Structure formats: C-alpha cells, structure tokens
Image (tube, coloured by chain):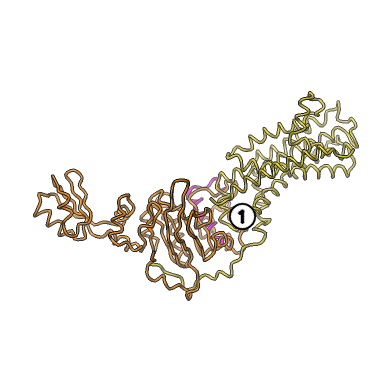
Amino acid sequence: MSTPSLAAPDLSTRRAPGLGSFNLTVLRLEVRRLLRNRRTVLFTMVLPVVFFLLFGLNSQYADQRHGYGNVSAFIMISMALYGAVLATTSGGAMVSIERAAGWSRQLRLTPLAPVAYIAIKMLTAMVLGLSSVTAVYVVGGLTGKPTMPVHLWILTALCVWVGSLVFAAFGLFMGYLLPTENVMQILSFALVLFAFGGGLFIPLSQYPKVLQTIAEFTPLYGLNELVHAPLTGGSPHLAWIANAVAWLAIFGGGAVWRFRKDTARV
Amino acid sequence: MTVESGDGSRPGGGSAPLVIDLTGVHKSFGPVEAVKGIDLNIASGEVVAFLGPNGAGKTTTIDMILGLSRPTAGRVTVFGMQSRQAIGRGLVSAVMQTGGLLKDLTVEETARYTASLFSHTRPVAEVLERAGIAAIAERMVGKCSGGEQQRLRFAMALLSDPELLILDEPTTGMDVEGRRSFWAAIRQDTARGRTVLFATHYLEEADAYADRIILVRQGKIVADGTSSEIKALAAGRTVRASLAGADEPSLRAIPGADDVEIRGETVLIHSSDSDAVARYLLTSTKARDLEITTRGLEDAFIALTSDDTDEYANSTGVPR
C-alpha cells in the first residue's frame, strides 16, 4: 500500500527561473560543443583562411586599388563573409542533430522556454561566426597585403558579423526542416552555390548577363554587396537591402514556422 | 473510479493537491485510440508501477502527464497545475526510455547544462554520486554504455530535486546486473519520500519496487492495487488433467470453476476451489495425470492483460 510522506511538498518555495532559463553556462557549453566538432572548426575557421591565402594574395591583382583600399582587402571581406555564414549556418543547423538525438524533447522536461533555446542557438552561432571573421581578419592583417583605413577594418568586420545573422536563421530553418544528422553536408553545398551566386568567389561582372540577373536574387547577393559597401564607397543600393531583408524574412519566417510545428503539443 | 483506501485523506491536512490527477483522459492518433478513458489519482509519496504490455498506452499516458502531448479529451493536472508549470518549477522530472542525450558533452557537462536551467538544484557532484556515475564524470556521453547513459538520465532527473519522478521503462535494454543496480539507486532515492511513477513491462520490477501497481491494457486501467491485491485477483489454482472428449459445459458447471480451457486432450480449469474440481474430475470423468498449480503475479498479469479478459476482470471485482 502507499506510504505517503509525512508532509505534503511545499510547492510555494519552487519558482520558475527568469529569462526562460536563458543563462551563460549553457551558452559556454554550446560553444564548447561546436568547437569540439573538428569538421565545424575546419569549415568555419580554416577553410575561409585558406581561401583568403589562395585568392587574396595573388600579386596580379591583390595590390590594385579598390575603393578606399585594395583588392586584397575586398577578397578578405568576401572570405570572412563566407566563413561567417558557414559558421552561423552550422550553429543554427545543430538543432537538427539535437532533434534527432531527442535532446530537444529532453529540454522540454526542463523550465527552458523554447524562445530562450532559440536565442541560445542564435547566439552560439554568432559566437562561432565572430571567431571565423576574426580568424580571417587576423591572418589577413598578418600577411600585410590587405590595405584599408583602420576604421574600415572594424566596420567591415562588424558588418560581416551582424549580416551573418541572416544565415543563423537559415541554419535553424534547415535544421528544423531536414531530419538528418548530415544536414551540414547538404548545407555546405548550398552555401557554395550561394557564395558563387553572391559573387563572393568570382565577381558577378564576369558572369554572362543571364546568370548575373539570376545571381541578384540569391541569398548572399545583397549581403555581400552591403558588407563591401564601406570599402567600395558610395551609398548602398536599395536592391541590396531589399535582397538581404527579403531573405532574412524568408529564413526567419521559415525557422519560426518549423519551430512552432516542432514544439507544438500534439 | 476509486483509489485504494487511505488515499482519501491527503497527507498534510487535506489541502495539498494530488500529485497526479487524470480525469477521463482519452488520446487518439488519427483513427487509433491509444488511451481510452483513464482516471488516475496518485498521492504524495506513493511509488506506483504502470504495468502493461507494449502498446498498452503507458508511454502515451506518461507523455500527457509530462505535457509533451495533449489529451484528446479529459483533464490532466500535476500538483494541481498544468504540467508545463509544474515542470517550470522543477517539481516534476522524468527518465525517458531512450535518446535525450548529446554525445559531444561529457557526463558532468550534461548535468551542469541541465542544472543551469533550473532555479533550484542539488549540487551536480552530489547527484552524480547518487546516480553512481561520479567516476565517469569526465567521459564523453557518446562513449558511455547504455546503462551509464541511463544513470545519467536518472542523475539529470534528480538535479531539480523533484517531488515527482517519472520513469518510462527505465531499464529497457539493460542486463540483469545493470537493472538490479539501477533499481537499487532508485530505491535508495525513493526512501526520501519522493513520489515515483514508473512504467514497465517487467513484472518483477513492479512487484519488487512499487507500493501500488496499475495494470493497463489497450488504453484502459484493468486493475489497481498492491502487488498482493493484484495477485489475489487471479487467486485460486489451475487444475490440469488429461481428458479425452471433455464436455466443456459440464466442466464449467463445477462449483468454483471460473475458467475452462480445453487444448486437445488436456483440460485446464482455473478455480477458487481446486479440491472440488479435482474431486469431480477424478470421480465423474476419466481424467488422469492431474496437476494442481498456483497462479503467480505473472499469470495474473497475463490473465488481466490478455485480450479476452474484459469479462473476467469485471466479474472478479477488480478494485478499480
């Protein structure tokens, strides 16, 4: 027969934590997890650095003037953007692995609010994005090739980093959409296409006219033009802003839609 | 539905809400009705086994108690509130069957991660010690054995020092030794007066660790009581004999015989008065090779949860 305890539990002493359980311990552990994944580190920090060393130092064009700096600086910004979007996409797409492992379900047995979880995922992605941008800029600085005014080093790096938030949303959206542990293999391929589409690897002016027109609608086009604008000079085109905002809306909206579906009680 | 006597008076003076209160809970998945009307009250400090074959609706019911899914009809409250609120306050935690772990964190990191989400927790080191995994705190979860991972799930559930602990088939896939030491850890813990509900399809686990057993079958509760009460439901003995050309109606007419089964030349008669059955068989029929056996919990389980026992369960006055 049952053996009730002598005193009923005092429920009033128990409180739900604030901020939906958002906290720095979790953020630190999430970043550590990302850094433990060698493939992620290779893709997000080593690869863009290697690309910069391959394409950004070529003596045929590296020292040519471009806007307020030189071509080497232009390429450094492109590679930093590529690394940052790889990083934030990887960070966001981690939800796919977590869902497959049943971790998301486990978290629903804790006070962690779904929105706080998303905030942690986005921030983790952004921390990784920042380390990728930093890696490219530090190596760029060490080679001595890229030249632009100091404030532009800082401004362009910040633009790249903040802009990569669009791809944290992309990673989350895909992470919720694709039920596979290999989601990043698919996404890395997609990002290479986006990078070509955005003109990160080859200037769009070298594409045939039809391809150029198509490229202007791809997700990295607006962002790539915008992060280079401080170096190139001149005011940003409305089309660039429209492209970036539209893709942010698509990825962000998609992530919210899939996320709601995932956390809905059935 | 009535709960066994003694639960009417709430510990702590009558005002404390039930730990678990399910009223008329139904759950359908499309055309499939997984839970067909469950009423369940569990009071503070009870250790309750949810016993039933696979597919009986145990996990579906637990998911609803935990707020992971919503009942199609009926009401679920935990400590008198919505499940989500109770979880938010750290009053309820659960050890699920599988999954729910990240391979790329260590045992200690997983516990620290979980602990950081609650406002009130026991120290991580203490909980790892209690779950018996302090020695492997630095090991990657992906390198832990199934039993070690299960202990980690248990440790994670203990972190918030919950008033209610729910375990869904916690020892599935463990070997005998793993199961024994896992239950020893749970047993030690429940001595503190925590309310525990565990689902299992192992009879011996229900028998050995629960104060109260709730038998479920096809989405309904078919029996609810202590282990000995459940056994008593299937009380009596089975008389087995070889008898060619047995006449079922006359066997059923034997006083006390409540179940007759004829398998070829073998008859099996379950009866509360096995002496009368034996006497009848030996004097009025040509029966030979007579054997009399007692039903254990296992037979009770089979009798109460197999498909054709609705009538039997009701006719024998299951204390529901």
| Residue A92 percent location from the top left of the image | 67, 44
Position of residue A256 in the picture relative to residue A227 (left or right): left
| Residue A29 percent location from the top left of the image | 65, 51
| Residue A58 percent location from the top left of the image | 83, 28
- SS majority, magenta: helix
Q: Is residue B155 magenta?
A: yes
Residue A176: tell me if it is visible. yes
Q: Relative to B191, is A261 above or below?
A: above
Q: Which chain is yellow?
A: A
Position of residue A120 in the picture relative to residue B206 (left or right): right
Crowding at dot 1, Cα within 10 Å, few <14 / some 14-19 / many 20+, comes out as many
Q: Chain B in the picture: what colour? A: orange
Residue B298: tell me if it is visible. no
Query: In the image, which residues are magenta?
Result: B139-160
> Residue at left 61%, top 66%?
A15
Q: Is residue B170 magenta?
A: no
Which one is nearer the viewer's eye here, B245 or A58? B245
What's under tag 1, amino acid-wise? Tyr
